[in-house]
Amino acid sequence: MNEAPTPAQCDIAIIGGGAGGVLVAIHLLRQARARLRIVLLEPHPVLAEGVAYATSHAEHLLNVPVRRMSCFDDASEDFLDFAAQALQVDAAGRDALAQTYVERRLYASYLRERLQQARQCAVAELIVIPQRAIALDDAGDGYRLQLQDDTALRCRRVALAVGNRPKPLPARGTAAVPPDTVLAAWDFDAVKRIAPDATVAIVGSGLSMVDAAMSLSANGHTGRLHVISRHALLPLPHAPHAVADFDAEALLAMSLRQRVHYLRRQAAHAVAQGLPWQSVMERIRPLGQRLWQSLPIGDQRRFLRHVVRWWDVHRHRIAPQMHARLQAMQASGQLQLHRGRLDTVMQAGRCVRVSLHTGDGGGPALDVERVINATGVEMRVQTMRNPLLSDLVGKGHAQPGPHGIGLKTARDGELVAADGRPQPRLIAMGSLRIGCLWESIAIPELRGQAQTAARLLLAD
């Protein structure tokens, strides 16, 4: 990343240089028709390496096939073109490549290359500043951003693409155990350094757990893996692409309970017709945000309490080869799944004792050598531990989103102030919009948000 001194002012500031922020920058540079100054604030030394794409390890694959990962809605095969060239796949192998799940690190390289190309062709200027914004004030004709090094940046408009932040380990006693025994699943290099014979507890059974398990498996890990999960549900696999034929729009008028029953019937019907159940999820995939927004607030709460984990494992699936590896680890007894809620962690000699609560009030205690926190991303803005977001809410520039998740936004991502006014000069995207959209962090959603954000930020 090319570093530059912080300018005094700019036309547009992008806060965050992960996948979301880079997508906004690409679309701004492509759409701009004037010599604007755009500043991207990102303290990490390499762009496009937010939580999802920071891995440098080959075993971490995309959870979406190559054909659906273009960063442009109007060039659906753009990532396929890049991957075919990078992997030296000829025309004969192109169709097969489109259906595969390639290494995630390749996608970060793709975003950086497309950003560099956009910079070379743009009339606008992009300046990357290795700083974090910690406060924002209204400056009349724009905003004043306070940066971590005590400098300030005045800008006319702002895109918030702060990305994802992992949840803290939900257990008492975490602070008292040696810090190198409790690792974040997204600390990919630290997970790779775990001794191959170590007994490991992985807290959480979602996509972060899959990353950790794949890293350990790639290392030839022989120690036992205890996966702790409230629902004991593992991610499910993708199937060969197929789309079931039924009236998906009918779901929008149904209650949550009716939707669950309807989808179960459609899945059973699809299987009876020789289609995979995944074809039903493919049919409703474009409706994800409308399905959430059309639910009454009470049904949204019921979804968050009772249905969300079932939705996640069916909607956010993994590459078939990764699923097969998990199944083999379970079948051999190496990976053991425990249904329960994490209670405490404490030092027990050379081990860490992990205690659980199960449905009957009791629960086993597991003695392990390492604990991996794979509980996923923090969604509630009050607990994200982000100074800028706390400042925005505290000053009334923003308010928490529905159910306290993310920030409240208007239709195109404009932050809604405490007094209810949408702010067209202050645009949020990605995880900050989960409360309003639910489906908001996958690339197919991010690229659309980035294109819309660029249009709004360049208006007038």
Image: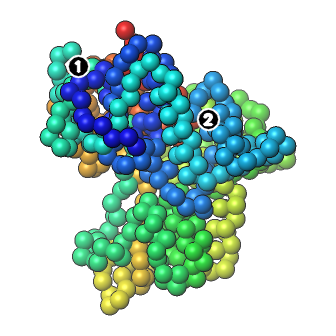
Judge from the rendering whether residue 196 lies leftward or rightward of residue 386; answer left or right: right
Quarter of the view holding residue 321: bottom right
Bin the neighbour count of mark 1 within 10 Å (Cα to Cα): few under 14, some 14-19, many 20 and up: some
Residue plotted at (36% across, 56% down): 167
Q: Which sits in the foreground, 281 or 444?
A: 444
> Could you tell me if residue 429 is visible in this image?
yes
Foreground residue, 99 or 235?
A: 99
Check the image and report above or below for 21 versus 387: above
Furthest-top residue in view? 460
Q: Residue 427 at what x, y percent from top left?
A: 36, 26
Q: Which mark is residue 70?
A: 2
User: Callout 2: few (<14), some (14-19), or many (20+) C-alpha neighbours within 10 Å?
Assistant: many
In terms of secondary structure, where does tag 2 sit?
A: loop
Residue type pointed to by label 1? Gly
Image-based side of 199 in relation to 99, left or right: left
How many marks the image carries: the answer is 2
Residue 188 is marked as: none
Task: Identify the residue at image location x=65%, y=33%.
Answer: 78
Q: As shown in the figure, which amino acid type bears the numbered disc 2? A: Ser
At horizontal 14% and vertical 40% (from top left) the residue drawn is 150
Q: Residue 193: x percent and y percent?
A: 46, 74
Label for residue 142?
1
Name the N-terminal-most of marks 2 and 1: 2
Front residue (pair 106, 184): 106
Q: Quadrant of residue 281?
A: top right
Residue 96, given in percent of the width and then of the height, sits at 79, 46
Tell me if 210 is positioned left or right of 364 in this view: right
Is 417 left, or right, of 314 in this rendering?
left
